[in-house]
Image: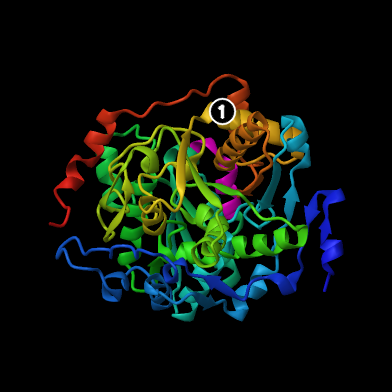
Amino acid sequence: MVIPQIKNDLMNRKILLDESDIPTHWYNIMADMPNKPLPPLNPKTGQPAGPGDLSPIFPMGLIMQEVSTERYVEIPDEVREIYKIWRPTPMYRATGLEKLLGTPAKIYYKYEGVSPSGSHKPNTAVPQAYYNKQEGVKSITTETGAGQWGTALAFACAQFGIRCEVYMVRISYDQKPYRKVMMNTFGAEVYPSPSDRTEAGRRILAEDPETSGSLGIAISEAIERAVMDDDTKYSLGSVLNHVLLHQTVIGQEAIKQLEYAGDYPDVVIAPLGGGSNFAGISFPFLKNNLTEGKNTRFVAVEPASCPKLTQGEFMYDFGDSAGYTPLLPMYTLGHNFKPAAIHAGGLRYHGASVLCSQLLKDGLIEAVALQQLECFEAGVMLAKSEGIIAAPEATHAVAQVIREANQAKEEGVEKTILFNLCGHGYVDMQAYDDYFAGKLTDHSFTENELKEGLKEIRELQPL
């Protein structure tokens, strides 16, 4: 056991834990939410969806976690053993960034880029593969945006001898070829989405052969493939309750690391595509707000071109474009929304998780939307000052951190900021090349886009 005095080595800007500090349980925020989320609905009956509605897609072990209200769920020993490959992840005091900004704020970041896939995604990919293996599943299908989730699931399936089939959003498939190579190396089959392998994909291609795709479309394709085979299940990398549950190992470790540093955050920041990254770092701290009277702010950062939290509406919507999923109560831009082809592929999703949506509705978390040029500028500042090139998704958190730090400087106040550096960008260098070449532009979201995106789903709202 490493003693706290050695762990708290801020001269080296690093706060380490050891294997004994890996959490033994996942934290379920459902137990402490003042207002429980509305239930998912079966779109055919309009009634709450139960385990039976989900069993063709997910193994029962994950379904029971999806509906659980228990505060803590034990992490299986087999999962914790694989976690040891990269967990606990390090936390850094960003003294280089602090100096560059000249801010009185203290900035910390939890670095999830040390995982096998280079992001936070294996935290849920491994348990999902484990529970599928426990129930005899032979193959798992999934979607991926930027490729981080597909890479994580490919790695996890390799640990349990499960076949992995990935549908990668077309624009990211073209922009990030080395993500595909990583997935292939771990043993996965990868297809650009929309594809001609599914009815949903063929329909979209017939309507728009040049489409850049979306996560909603890729989800539809993966689900369609899963329900065709009794030995195959579907796996989702964000949005659902059990996915967010698994990610809470991040925040639990962060609490312990800041405890060793003798500090506690005034604000916690993370990007939000579907919600797992944001939930992973924030939910354990939010528990302390809800149960111990802490007063930390929580800021979810989304792209201005896909602003479901800041401009979308709270309503029931499908999680996919074809309408294969149950109706979920969430902030949404409409499941047929076609996002701009920004490089932050993991954030190009039309809706937010049920849990994050309810928390935002209740005013327990905040949301901001940022343009990609500001985010890439922030990513370059982080690289120069901290030596890590962040994934395009992660630069959204960095940009908001810089805003918070500059505000602290203007007001002359001390502030402790924690953010989740959810992944590295070393296979996303085309994005940075395009940024330096002046090829990237900002994208404005219009009210007409929202009106069109929500038109169809309004007809399916429960009375």
Q: Residues within 10 Å of mark 1 (few under 14, many from 20)?
A: some
* Viewer-nearest residue: 272 or 42: 272
Magenta region includes residue 178: yes
Q: Residue at x 34, y 68 (%)?
A: 57
Percent from the top left, x then y, of residue 301?
Answer: 50, 42
Specify the amino acid type for callout 1.
Answer: Glu
* Viewer-nearest residue: 230 or 357: 357
Magenta region includes residue 403: no
Q: Quadrant of residue 170?
A: top left
Q: Is residue 302 left or right of residue 336?
A: right
Percent from the top left, x then y, of residue 221?
Answer: 34, 53
Task: Point out the residue furthest to the top here.
Answer: 438
* Element on which disc 1 rests: helix
Please say whether residue 296 is visible from this viewpoint. Answer: yes
Q: Which residue is mark 1?
A: 374
Region rendered in magenta: 174-184
Quadrant into which the C terminus falls: bottom left
- Decide: is 125 above or below 65: above
Q: Residue at x 60, y 43 (%)?
A: 178
Q: Quadrant of residue 390?
A: top right
